[in-house]
Image (cartoon, rainbow, N blue to C red):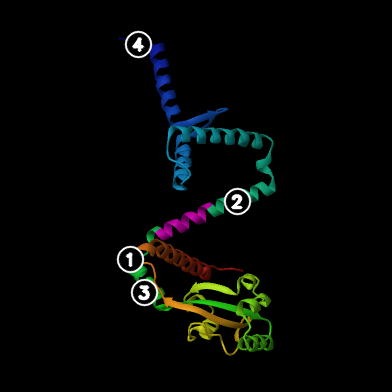
Amino acid sequence: MTFKPARLLLALIAVVSASAFAQNAAVVNGKAIPSSRLDEAVKQVVAQGQGQDSPQLRAAIKEELITREVLMQEAVKQGFDKKPEVKQALDNARQTIVVNQLARDYITKNPVSDAEIKAEYDKAKAANGDKEYHVRHILLGTEDEAKAVIAKLKGGAKFEELAKQSKDTGTANNGGDLDWAPPSQFPPEFAAGFSKLQKGAITDVPVKTQAGFHVIKVDDTRPLTLPALDQVKPQIAEALSQRKLQEYQEQMVKKAKVQ
């Protein structure tokens, strides 16, 4: 079959138009919404666990992009993009996006090694020790108040009842219960106050911390069982990555000339 020149031109225009349409998810008032934007939006939704890539999901996101484009065009038409507060917000958003990309690039180029993860795990394991305690406490404002509570306890008063006067409102109505935890989870001076006590024992003297004066009781002790390395490896890796990123940020700030 031989095309006449006019028909050949129309055919070429149709091919080009079809190709352009394939590159766009939609065209709104002459403004294209690239298919890549739709793909990226779908990717983000899937990555956040909010759905699976499907024709239905793509259709819903496409409608959202179209609505957003319509509203954006109207906002520009009314001059909102020229307002100082909008320009400032856009600049802040742009800065955040660019800085986040820098952070992702740094983490990608400076990955956390298995050796670093193992060392951090061993460090945490050593810091937590091999025992955890179920403790209760009563927090008082002065040393004399704490001594008075200790005297009442020695006289037979119930710890749970006296705990109601604790300044720690989060545990006052729960008998001062701090649940199970290793000493490393508490302030050093607080941990030192109870870590040598036997089951059922109460501190003989008030334990002072930044919060005030504590009377501490050890309800029970048990061997500490930490999760296996494989179970916590992702969390340790993430924490180390964030630590590396923080150190990188601090180095950049130190090098910067700030006036």
Is 211 situated above or below 94? below
Helix, strand or loop at disc 1?
helix
Q: Please name which of the two marks, 1 or 4, marks the residue nearer to the observer.
A: 1
Helix, strand or loop at disc 2?
helix
Q: Is residue 104 magenta?
A: yes
Q: Please name which of the two marks, 3 or 2, marks the residue nearer to the observer.
A: 3
Q: Position of residue 117 (x, y in %)?
A: 36, 68
Write down the region rendered in magenta.
97-107
Mark sitting on residue 122: 3
Does any portion of residue 236 appear in the rendered image?
yes
Q: Amino acid at mark 3?
A: Asp
Quarter of the picture containing the N terminus is: top left
Kindly indicate whether the residue at mark 4 contacts the one at mark 1 (C-beta within 8 angstroms): no
Q: Amino acid at mark 2?
A: Asp
- Residue tagged 4: 3
Is 32 situated above or below 141? above
The tag earlier along the polypeptide, 1 or 4, is 4
- Residue tagged 1: 114
Q: In the depicted view, which residue is nearer to us: 169 or 173? A: 173
Q: Please name which of the two marks, 2 or 1, marks the residue nearer to the observer.
A: 1
Q: Amino acid at mark 4?
A: Phe
Task: Look at 54% across and 84% down and name the residue there.
Answer: 189
Q: Position of residue 208 (x, y in %)?
A: 60, 85
The tag earlier along the polypeptide, 4 or 3, is 4
Q: How many marks?
A: 4
Disc 3/disc 2 C-alpha distance (Å) = 44 Å
Binning the other alpha carbons within 10 Å of mark 1 as few (below 14), some (14 to 19) or many (20 upward) gives few
